[in-house]
Image: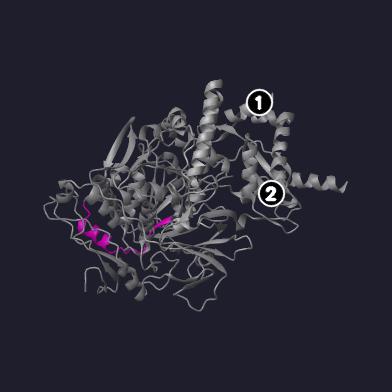
Amino acid sequence: MSDQEDSIVPSGVAVVKRISESLSDNPLGESKSSVTTLHQNNNHSSDLIKKGLVDHPQIKSAGEVKDSQDTTCAEPAVTTISSTSEAPAKPPRSPKTEEHLENPLSGASVPLELSTVSLAPAEQLWCHSRDHAVKLRMTESGLGSEAPMTVHQMFLETVENYGDLPALSSKKDGQWVTLTWREYYQQCRAAAKSFLKLGLERYHGVGILGFNSPEWFISDIGCILAGGLAVGIYTTNSPEACLYVAENCEANVLVVENHKQLLKILQIRDKLPHLKAIVQYKDELQQKLPNLYTWAEFMKLGEEVPDELLNAVVESQRANQCCTLIYTSGTTGNPKGVMLSHDNVTWTSNAAGVMTDLQHGVECVVSYLPLSHVAAQVNDMWICMRFAAATYFADPDALKGSLGATLKEVRPTSFLGVPRVWEKMQEKLKAIGAKSSGIRKKVSDWAKSIGLQANYSAMNGENLVPWGFMLANNLVFKKVRWAMGLDRCKNCLTGAAPITKETLEYFMSLNLPLYELYGMSESTGPHTISWENNYKIMSCGKVLIGCQTKLDKPDEDGNGEICFWGRHVFMGYLSMPEKTAEALDQEGWLHSGDLGKLDKDNFLFITGRIKELIITAGGENIPPVPIEDAVKAEIAIISCAMLLGDKLKFLSMMLTLKCLVDDNGEPTDELAPEAVEFCQQRGVTATKVSEILANKEPAIYKAIQEGIERVNAKATSNAQRVQKWVILDRDFSISGGEIGPTMKLKRGVVVKMYQDKIREIYGIAEESRET
């Protein structure tokens, strides 16, 4: 039997052997060591499939998909796009120094043997128990066939090859402090030992409640190495919401950022029978309490824990077992704990990076979006680990204004922003442009027209550079990119929520195209990706190599429910068998709840969300997002728009105006500069939202009505016309509860909050019709 054939070890665990040498356990680092290298071998997956340890669908023809696991299921009406092409060649590794080869861990004790990737026995593609394993959706060739690996193996491979390169950088007293990959690994092992010392049990949670920081990463990965389940908790959560998550994951330890977050936990700790300790990683403790530790105290707790004990825990982990939980935002009920396996995390990180041509050891990102959300976690922590990228942590007030300064300092090579971040940048750039002199403004407008033309040409594969592009690039585009801190950025990414065509075209006009991603927590983040020379406006890209997209029950226009298949698909919802069965069908396809269609080039376009569809009293199905986006694009003063009309006789809309936010992210009464400019252009001197509402400012109300009428003129039917609208006195916000951490609108919450307004809209309308 060759080194790359699979075998069954005495414990009954399926093992895929990988070419490697054992790692040194000598604290002096004198023994020979080598990286545990991931080798692609198409025999891996085919042999595993034969043994029933992994699974993949048999693609028969368009509209017919069959899963080898369950041959008795009726064939659904589907359109199938399979990504079966070979993966692009892996980027070359950076040259290794002698120190990398001879002393990879600089004194750290590590497991003696990491030469195998193991799969635990599994019967199904899904589960709902924390200690169960699942089959893997592997392909017989290409990227989807690569040998599975655990988080520790991925981490160790990076440490061995890039141990002296920067991994994590954060500001302390105004100066950047950096951990190398080797130091990062050592600290994660130290944290893992401390978790074991505190009594962390296998598959129990470690909840992390705080802003992005090295301590957040170290807590997360240390927990995984110690056999626990890493659980991010949103910093905006109430004590009750924290209680639900901590209770659901049976958290043994909660790690909090500061006293503010600590107070939430102190209010609920008596209701958490599994909780053994709390760790605060910033600021001094304001009070001493039993089982409450500072970060420094915590990191010293495990000093006496033997390396052999941690090594045994690490070596017992299998790639098809759960390692982390991502909790959904709970917009339609209690949050669900999305169970992700080691393979979910490690395979998806590699696939996304390979597809977008990330280079090992040279990339860097800025971490500022909530790490409790899958998009930020995969982008900032896991992809960076796979490709030895450097992560720079923004200040906690990043979204209140400091992000721009951080971007200018770091100059990231990749930047992920939710749509609202890009919209804020757009508003700021427009406000600066509005103050420009006549000649400068003309030059800027000319350059942007050239930029839009050039980028549409590139997007369509024409590569026709319009006359004047080089001049526009030198006069405008380069300067804007430099001023934004994005002059080195190859991948300007947007995801987690819909983005408007206006915003996409605005950045295209600056020669800064945004590449849209699409996915969900249940797909370990990305399912489709756009990247350089592979994007289309308003499309969220092409399916990850090694994965598949199915459109279930497509209509006459080709719109169907988007379903996912691949190694990125989650294990199931923790302790929720019914919800798991709703998300995963009997063939193992993940049903997204989103509607979409594919074009001739296999680019995916999202056309709506099943649960968000408004079904009018007349029975017409109306997706709200396109109408809402159109209104925001037409009327520059509008911040948020929410369409109403479900089970009602006509459509109406609630609107908010663009305003400034305070230091806590709360919307104020002060109009944003773009809104003030909108008013001034119409001869209105108002600078506050309340002033416009108090006077029902005729010029502003007229401008909004005219914008609504322009949108209505493009409606495909009378039922899709907005007949009434109302301006709310306060913009939507995370703290207000109307939007979630990734700026998605919580429609159900908004409807409950503004019941009186809704009754007023429809009540007045009914009365007027009756008379």
Label 2 sits on residue:
644
Label 2 sits on a secondary structure element that is strand
Q: Is residue 417 left or right of residue 90?
A: right
Say what amino acid the circle numbered 1 marks. Gln
Compared with 138, 496 (above or below) is: above
Residue 311 located within the stretch drawn in magenta: yes
Q: How is the image coloured?
A: one colour
Q: Residue furthest bottom?
A: 72
x and y percentages locating residue 64 in the rendered image: 52, 71
x and y percentages locating residue 115 in the rendered image: 22, 63
- Which is more N-terminal, label 1 or label 2? 2
Decide which of 261, 605 is in the foreground and name it: 605
Residue 556 located within the stretch drawn in magenta: no
Q: Residue at x 34, y 61 (%)?
A: 202
Decide which of 523, 97 is in the foreground and name it: 97
Label 1 sits on residue:
681
Decide which of 724, 581 is in the foreground and name it: 724
Q: Which residues are magenta?
A: 304-325
Q: Quadrant of residue 86?
A: bottom left
